Image (spheres, rainbow, N blue to C red):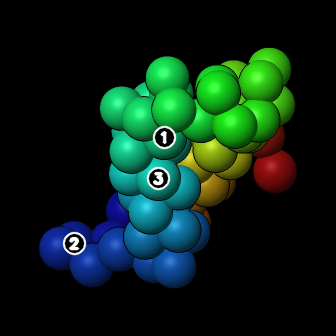
């Protein structure tokens, strides 16, 4: 791991997780607009955010 510095994947992952949190707060309104696709959007944002965080350079979570 890098000391005190984070790569691009870290910031992309955190941005996607923040977007999923915002979409979760407004899930009621989004459900009215998009129906079940609002929940799919939330799951995709959260999953992609976690994926980018776990693939941060130097992480040993996934095999090379």
Q: Residue at x 51, y 79 (%)?
A: 8
Using the rendered image of the protein, determine whether residue 58 is visible from the camera's viewpoint.
no
**23 to 40, vertically: above or below:** below
Q: Are marks 1 and 2 in contact (CB under 8 Å)?
A: no
Q: Quadrant of the N terminus?
A: bottom left
- Sort mark 2 into few (<14), some (14-19) or many (20+) by Cα contacts within 10 Å: few
Residue 53, position in %: x, y?
52, 51
| Residue mark closest to the camera, 2 vs 3 | 3
Q: Nearer the viewer, residue 32 or 13?
A: 32
**47 to 12, vertically: above or below:** above
Q: Residue at x 80, y 20 (%)?
A: 36
The residue beneath circle 1 is 23
- Sort mark 3 into few (<14), some (14-19) or many (20+) by Cα contacts within 10 Å: some
Using the rendered image of the protein, determine whether residue 41 is visible from the camera's viewpoint.
yes
Under circle 3, the secondary element is helix
Q: Which mark is residue 3?
A: 2
Left or right placement of residue 47 versus residue 58 in this view: right
Q: Distance from label 1 to label 2 (Cα)?
A: 32 Å
The residue beneath circle 3 is 19
Who comes first in sequence, dot 1 or dot 2? Answer: 2
């Amino acid at each position: 791991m890098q000391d005190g510095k984070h790569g691009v994947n870290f910031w992309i992952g955190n941005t996607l997780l923040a977007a999923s949190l915002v979409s979760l707060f407004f899930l009621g309104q989004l459900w009215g607009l998009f129906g079940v696709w609002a929940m799919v959007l939330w799951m995709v944002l959260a999953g992609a955010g976690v994926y980018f965080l776990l693939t941060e350079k130097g992480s040993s979570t996934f095999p090379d």
